[in-house]
Image (cartoon, rainbow, N blue to C red):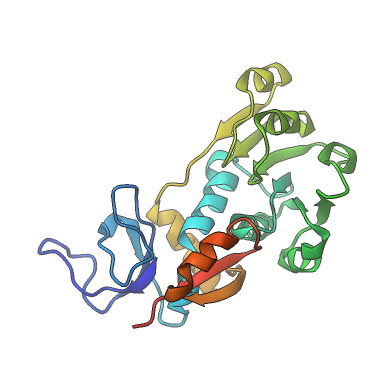
Amino acid sequence: VAGTVAAVGSKVTTFKPGDRVIGLLDMVESGATAEYVAISTANLVPFPATLSLADGAALPGAGLTAWQGLFTLGQLQANQRVLITGAAGGVGTFAVQFAKWRGATVIGTASSANASVLQALGLDQLIDYHTQTVAAALTDPVDLILNLAPLSDEDVTALLKQLKPVGRLVSTLNPADETVAKRLGVSAHQMAVAMVSADLAKIVDLVTHNQVHAEITQRVSFTDLAQVHEQVGHTHGKVVIEVAP
């Protein structure tokens, strides 16, 4: 969610009415698709006036997922090789940019229709999942696999064979078999995004300095919410829902 603080609780000192903020609601808070939301200050970071609040709404969920998958769990370093499955999605387009910013070689699975967009974001090699398999397309093993695609447990587990020794697989969806991972000498992790203000503040800093950006492919009004939900899984990048003031 992104917006301007309308009111604060009596004990709040970190924000005041009028402040521009972005954040990620947790499971016990109300949904973000609303004119007003109540949110903990721990789940917010300041957002600069030089950036669009509508664009800011695209950062927390997808940006934090990509950041934590690559760096917190994935421990990606410069000069390593990373495979990102589902690279054209909302999380994937951030992950490609973050990995390239870190100095990694970035390989991604996506439709060839998204090749030019992903290459502009920094992708080094595209594997078209319509015509290629990862096993056939990869000539060398990778240090990290970030799985963002809706693969079966068996298909995610099969990806473990594409890792270097002590490599890591991080999946935001179905998990890989940890017993198989241990036998291969690699590690498998299933993740869920967490609101970490330091991570989100770093992402905002990168966006502010034009080092990464939200790949927003569609902007729709609040009244078109049902249409947006029908498109989930069939668009690349991020769709932003704009609530009129």
List x then y, in percent, for residue 115: 80, 63
Tell me where residue 117 sits by quadrant: bottom right
Tell me where residue 32 sits by quadrant: bottom left
List x then y, in percent, for residue 141: 81, 36
Q: Residue furthest left?
A: 10
Q: Quadrant of the C terminus?
A: bottom left
Residue at 34% across, 47% down: 27
| Front residue of this view, candidates 66 and 115 | 115
Residue at 36% across, 64% down: 45
User: Above or below — where is 199 with respect to 77?
Assistant: below
Residue at 82% across, 41% down: 134
User: Above or below — where is 34 with respect to 174?
Assistant: below
Left or right relative to 115: residue 143: left
Left or right relative to 197: residue 58: right
Q: Quadrant of the N terminus?
A: bottom left
| Front residue of this view, candidates 233 and 27 | 233
List x then y, in percent, for residue 89: 64, 58
